Amino acid sequence: MPSPALLADTAPFSGALRAPRSWLHSDAPSLSLNGDWRFRLSPTADLPEDVARPDLDDDGWDTLPVPAHWVLHGDGRYGRPSYTNVQYPFPIEPPFVPDENPTGDYRRRFDLPAGWPEDARVVLRFDGVESLYRVWLNGAEVGSASGSRLAHEFDVTDLVRAEGNVLAVRVHQWSAASYLEDQDQWWLPGIFRDVTLSARPADGLEDVWLRTAFTESAGTGSGAGTVLPELTADASAFPVALRIPELGVEAVWESPADVAPVAVGPVEPWTAETPRLYDATVAARGETVSLRVGFRTVEIRGDRFLVNGRRVVFHGMNRHETHPERGRVFDEEHARADLIRMKRFNVNAIRTSHYPPHPRLLDLADELGFWVILECDLETHGFATAGWQGNPSDDPRWRDAYLDRIRRTVERDKNHPAIVMWSLGNESGTGANLAAMSAWVHDRDPERPVHYEGDYTGEYTDVYSRMYSSVPETEQIGTDGSVAPLLGCTPAQGARQRTKPFLLCEYAHAMGNGPGALDQYEALVDAHPRLHGGFVWEWRDHGILTRTADGTPYYAYGGDFGEVVHDGNFVMDGMVLSNDVPTPGLHEFAAVAQPVALTFDGDELVVTNRRHSASTADLTLRWSVEHDGREAASGSLDLPVVEAGDSVRLALPAIPVADDAETWLTVTAELTADAAWAPAGHVVARAQLDRSAPRPVTPAGRARDWQDADGTLTLGPAVFERGRLVSLAGRAVAGPRLELFRAPTDNDEGAAYGDLAYSDASVLGVSSASLWREQGLDRLTHRVVSVHEAENGVRTVTRVSAANSAHSVTVETVWTLTDGVLDLRVEIEPSAGWPSVWPRIGVRFDLPDRDGVIDAAEWFGTGPLESYPDSTRAAYVGRFRATVAELNVEYARPQETGHRSAVREVDLGAFGFTALPDGRGRLPGFSLSRHTPQQVAAAGHPHELPESDTTYLFVDAVQHGLGSRACGPDVWPEFALRPKARTLRLRFRA
Ligand code: GAL
């Protein structure tokens, strides 16, 4: 019997476990045990220990690759993934777990390779197993361990043989450790990282830590470096030599007592922008390890977080390890492509939420350049539900487990220059065990600050960190002298927190269409130096590639595998879709986080270098002038080298201004040469200046002599039947029809975070979407009040309302034909008293396929991607073309998408229109879809959208903002759409 005792043991391991050490690139012999293993899955942990027996006949077992999660193999035979955010998928009765505990038995045979050193100790290493596992070699028990995303090494010297070894591992999905691993992600059991056997020569290097520091020599960009070596090695390993050939370093230490700091210089610093690495080796008698060192000094001075003496601003992403087919199994190519994508989108920092990633990821971060907050594998969020009662974080029985986790975290990755902070974990309440972890880190690595968001009052951490604080609250944190209460703090505690550097470890929840307000947070960071930026939640969707019964592929989320408890699509909250496609939100982020600011002041362009330390020497400035989106002139501007923090003013080029078109100047900052992460020409920043000459808008003509409409009326390209539009340019068209509904975004559906700062108290805890449904915005009915026609016009008044509602909207549409020009004016007038914000104020035109499918648009306006009132920074004015499929984003759960703001001209092939500004100069937006918002709202996944025989054109006078209320603040009032009267003016042409 296994051991209910073992499963409920809060001790993190048993047996011959070795002390944690760095993940090193060593020349000592090793043998990868990855590959096919024999595998058997049982529904319970209550099993005989036959798995350990070398003579057990496992021929009938299945095979399963290592590394892998068993639930992602076997087509359901091995269970299915399950997703929860905060909830524990088992009863909360710590440290116990249910007997229904999927248990995987793994076996594999191996021989030692020829030439394996006989006198070396032999170490068996597991880089990641979820959640608790026991190991036997040749029938003898080696030990057990938990800490799923942490490495464990067992000494198997006395058990291993030259040939015919039988290694057995029993993995339990649930254990006491599961209480500490309640991160918001899929539960994915199995041996999911590498298994390696390595020889540890007696005269080898047990551990190496090259701590580095950098001091800049004023104004030179380079400076003095120091290497502070810490070697863990037997005396017999000496002499040991540290070599950094490029710096001419060769330090040879004859004995452990000789090991001493080495001053080097001049060196170039390591930063996230200039990830300068130097190849180093540390050679002992019996082993050489290779490292890539970067020189940098991390420091907190007052309320500033500095690297190499300069303030760091995190333009960061929370990065989970997730792959649509592999789950948390590391795929280096995929990870590298993701990091390159991050660099291209101006991301400069990563928080490894909420556990250490595969160790190789840190090599990539060093190489490509990211500020990394490396987080320990810890979360006990499920205890929040019961007011944190019984939370392991403050229970002495769990102290060893907490300390074991942080030791394994820090020791494994301590050599990486990219890591500038350690994080104790996520959402684990607070308590003595967290304080103990922090104390351990402070002692072991005094050079890196300790982060933990849950330490609201700052009792044991070095930086003040919050998640999802609203814009006003973040501003209060950034300003001195405010007595505004901070979350969980007394005024005095709040005052203390304000003496520290502040960062948002999570903000801008990127679920579905959104987030809004990225620019507002960025403006705060620019204004208040205590604010050091933050980390968007999160980098990518965690969709699991799945197929419907009929074979249609789709990305699954919570509930798609029949889980008993789950949290739906809350796991699809990334800036990148499951299929690697960057969302418009990520484009917005790139525009907001651009490393140089390009602004216009009169006839000058002001270029401000917003980087940490790199100059603009790598950038070229290009410009172009467009007339109504068509290029009229272009060139480049000489950009002198602008140092970080400086700015320069440049004269604008001569701009040819058109008198019959809009004139826009676009300036871009582009990479001059190929970088490690993007080719030459890659745009890092863009700005536009409107230089249009004022142009009168020809007013629409007037019709008079109105009479009751009946029969057919033709106005230029438009045909009306009893006042109703039936065709345009020879094809069937119906509309305009008022539309106030949009398929709710995940943020529209969010209710958890009503925000006292600016929501109506009456709607706290209620999502906008549910108010919309309550008011019937998704099921409006229409009653034509009057229809009139004149020789050159048609006028309709319609009252629009919903069942059982006394609120209404009166819509007047007036078509006129004057000198061959067909104008439409739509007046939209709400009755008094509509209670909540509206999703949109617009009209819909139906374009049935039977006269030819309209499947693309060309437009002059903003693009190329969708934009909404609080997410407009990536949109620029130009002429664009896209198919309906390209116009709309395939969010994991279908929702509002595709709105192009401030449109001037749209051409749909068969016909087109010009949008004229309303009386206050505002332009509408448009979208084109194969589905109505009602159809989109009803689909849980893209494949559930019905077949369509119509294209729908929406012209919106205005849309509601996006916000990030799926887990964060609601739409800012300026961008919230309150019911109001609006006018649309469109001029159609065939
Ligand atoms: C945070 C948490 C994240 C994630 C996010 C919502 O509270 O730290 O892991 O759950 O909310 O998506």
Image: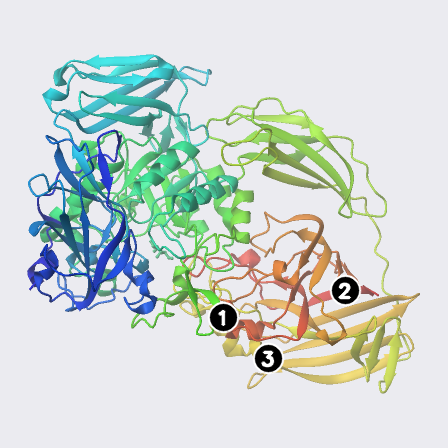
Relative to 869, residue 557 above or below: below
Residue at mark 2: 985
Q: Nearer the viewer, mark 3 or mark 1?
A: 1
> First in sequence: mark 3 or mark 1?
1
Residue positioned 59% across, 47% down in the render? 873
Circle count: 3
Q: Is residue 296 above or below residue 92?
A: above
- Asked where in the image residue 288 lies, by quadrant, the reply is top left
User: Could you tell me the amino acid type at mark 3?
Assistant: His
Q: Position of residue 471 (x, y in %)?
A: 45, 50
Nearest the viewer among 521 and 149 is 149
Q: Which residue is mark 3?
A: 807
Which tag, 2 or 1, sits closer to the chain's start?
1
User: How far is disc 3 from disc 1 in space, using C-alphas?
Assistant: 18 Å
Confirm or reject: label 1 Cβ below 8 Å from ligand 1: no
The residue tagged 1 is 769
Q: Quadrant of the N terminus?
A: bottom left
x, y percentage for residue 8? 11, 60
Residue 8 visible to an observer of this rendering: no
Q: Residue at x 15, y 31 (%)?
A: 117
**At numbered mark 1, what does the secondary structure look like: helix, strand or loop?**
helix
Q: Amino acid at mark 2?
A: Arg
Q: Quadrant of the C terminus?
A: bottom right
Res. 366 visible in picture: yes
Q: Nearer the viewer, residue 761 or 732?
A: 732
Vertical arrangement, residue 636 with respect to residue 835, above or below: above
Q: Residue at x 29, y 73 (%)?
A: 564
Residue type (three-letter) at the residue carrying disc 1: Ala
- State which mark lies toward you, 3 or 2: 2
